[in-house]
Image (spheres, rainbow, N blue to C red):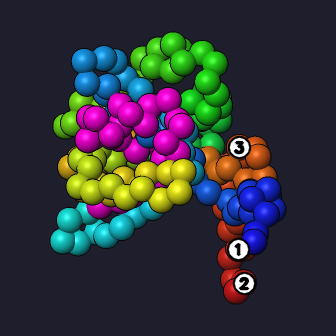
């Protein structure tokens, strides 16, 4: 049997991009959380992706009930926003930034992100403590040209420093 703590320690060494997954609670307001478990499923024939969500996350029920969400891929400059959405404190401050917009599904899209994928859920699967939401993308926004993603590794947020080889070297 694998020790769950050892598994978690090992997975913390896997650097992952950080996204804010947002939705609208039916009859309520916007909800969201920081996620590192977002993966492309296919580009054709229908662009789709998946997100794995712990069922204990406060907005799991809203995401399940609404059937829509937006994946907002964060830049290295958005560590404070990622921290805000990672903590259960100050949930009331999460959507105060004026850069929030609505896309096709009505889910909040962060105009300060690198990209936003507005999605409709097509299937779900329960696995252990999580729900895997598979969704088709209905709208995509690329918000800027500077692509410096925010990463999460070993319990902290950090940027990716892209190395450029000097001219004339391999």
Residue position for label 3 = 157
Question: Image height check: is 8 above or below 44?
Answer: above
Answer with mark 3 or mark 1, whichever residue precedes in sequence. 3
Q: Are marks 2 and 1 in contact (CB under 8 Å)?
A: yes
Measured as percent of width and height from the top left, residue 110 is found at 41, 32
Residue 30 visible (yes or no) = yes
Which quarter of the rendering shows the C terminus?
A: bottom right
Q: Which mark is residue 165?
A: 1
Measured as percent of width and height from the top left, residue 96 is found at 47, 14
Q: Residues within 10 Å of mark 2 (few under 14, many from 20)?
A: few
Question: Does 108 lie within the magenta span?
Answer: no
| Helix, strand or loop under label 3 | strand
Q: CA distance from mark 2 to mark 3?
A: 32 Å
Q: CA distance from mark 2 to mark 1?
A: 7 Å
Residue position for label 2 = 169
Frontmost of labels 2 and 3 is 3
Query: Residues in magenta?
Result: 48-72
The structure residue drawn at horizontal position 53% and vertical position 57%, both measured from the top left corner, is: 128
Question: Image height check: is 158 above or below 123?
Answer: above
Q: CA distance from mark 3 to mark 1?
A: 25 Å
Q: Residues within 10 Å of mark 3 (few under 14, many from 20)?
A: some
Q: Are marks 3 and 1 in contact (CB under 8 Å)?
A: no
Which quarter of the rendering shows the N terminus?
A: bottom right
Q: Furthest-front residue in view?
A: 1
Residue 108 figure quarter: top left
| Helix, strand or loop under label 1 | loop
């Amino acid at each position: 049997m694998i020790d769950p703590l050892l598994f978690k320690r090992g997975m913390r060494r896997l650097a992952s991009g950080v996204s804010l997954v947002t939705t609208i609670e039916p009859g309520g307001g916007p909800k969201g959380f920081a996620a590192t478990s977002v993966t492309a499923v296919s580009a054709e024939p229908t662009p789709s992706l998946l997100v794995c969500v712990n069922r204990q996350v406060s907005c799991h029920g809203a995401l399940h009930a609404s059937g829509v969400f937006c994946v907002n891929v964060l830049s290295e400059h958005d560590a404070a926003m990622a921290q805000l959405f990672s903590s259960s404190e100050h949930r009331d401050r999460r959507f105060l930034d004026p850069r929030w917009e609505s896309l096709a599904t009505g889910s909040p899209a962060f105009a300060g992100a690198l990209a936003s994928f507005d999605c409709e859920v097509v299937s779900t699967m329960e696995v252990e403590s999580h729900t895997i939401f598979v969704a088709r993308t209905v709208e995509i926004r690329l918000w800027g040209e500077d692509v410096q993603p925010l990463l999460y590794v070993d319990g902290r947020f950090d940027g990716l420093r892209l190395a450029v080889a000097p001219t004339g070297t391999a």
